[in-house]
Amino acid sequence: MSDWFTVTPIDANTIAISEWGHWEKVHSFLLIGTDSALLIDTGLGIGSLKKVVDTYTDLPIIVCTTHIHTDHIGGHHEFCTHYVHEAEVDWLENGIPGRSLEDVKRDVIRDCTKPLPEEFRIENYTIYTGPASLVLQDQDVIQLGNREVQVLHTPGHSPGHLCIFEKQTGYLFTGDLLYVEAPIYAFYPSTSPSDLMNSLERISQLENVHKIYGSHNKLGLNPSIFVEVQEAIDYIRTNDLAKFGTGIHRFSKIAFQF
Ligand SMILES: [Zn+2]
Ligand SMILES: [Zn+2]
């Protein structure tokens, strides 16, 4: 198998599947229950994510997408059960407005620090579209047998962005709402800087978060980062900066680009 993907165990039944060789340093996550397994996002679409997943479980796979951006749905075509928030059903089924396939393809293969898998052909790269198996709303619960997760509608970076919280373990998967080492973006037309602030405030007030897993860069953040998140929110609101065109706002570990 190609070594494009790096698997990092989080616990005996939870793994991170990372694409460190790409400049976006994307993570997908597999949570294995007793009846089914939850795959949070499917990465960039470079190489076969399913081959990796298949080595860890033969349970039915539910793909829950944090949001319909191309770096989170790259491997969607390899799976058949797709859950998505109601505000992005249209993007899943009919495509994402705004970016041409050529632009996306350029971003997929540029600046890679690992060789691309031999079987990967950028000429064959397409942006996934397909039906939603289940349309999610805020606070819906997904059952995996002995595990369950709750989805939280956290718009801002995109209109139907979801965070996924497992109360039992305290794992909070934050997609593109919270990560470090690069600005958190809300500058496309379909984003909302003020919603992003509200969503961040909401997750930072969750109780019993033990570890935060964003979709990009450093893997696994301690919940102490919520102190900085709240300070950043306060600063941005006080200075009326949660608006398009206000640029990059850097704090200690996190940054925003509006
Ligand atoms: Zn995104
Ligand atoms: Zn992303």
Image: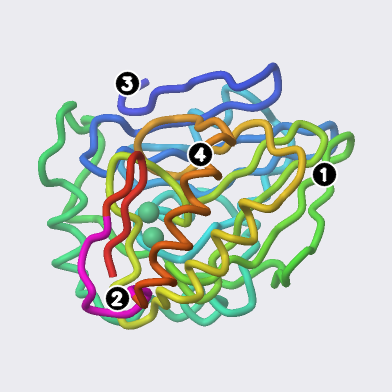
**Start-end of magenta stretch:** 241-249
- Number of callouts: 4
Q: Quadrant of ligand 1?
A: bottom left
Residue at the spot of label 4: 225
User: Mark 1 or mark 4, which has the lower sequence index?
Assistant: 1
Badge 2 amino acid:
Tyr
Residue at the spot of label 1: 148
Marks 1 & 3, CB-CB < 8 Å contact: no
Neighbours of disc 1 within 10 Å: few (<14), some (14-19), many (20+): some
Neighbours of disc 4 within 10 Å: few (<14), some (14-19), many (20+): some
Residue 3, numbered label: 3
Residue 188, numbered label: 2
Neighbours of disc 2 within 10 Å: few (<14), some (14-19), many (20+): few
Q: CA distance from mark 1 to mark 3?
A: 31 Å
Q: Secondary structure at mark 2?
A: loop
78 or 109: which is nearer to us? 109
Q: CA distance from mark 2 to mark 1?
A: 33 Å
Badge 3 amino acid:
Asp
Q: x and y percent of residue 230 in the render?
A: 52, 54
Q: CA distance from mark 1 to mark 4?
A: 25 Å
User: Is 104 situated left or right of 34 in this image?
Assistant: left
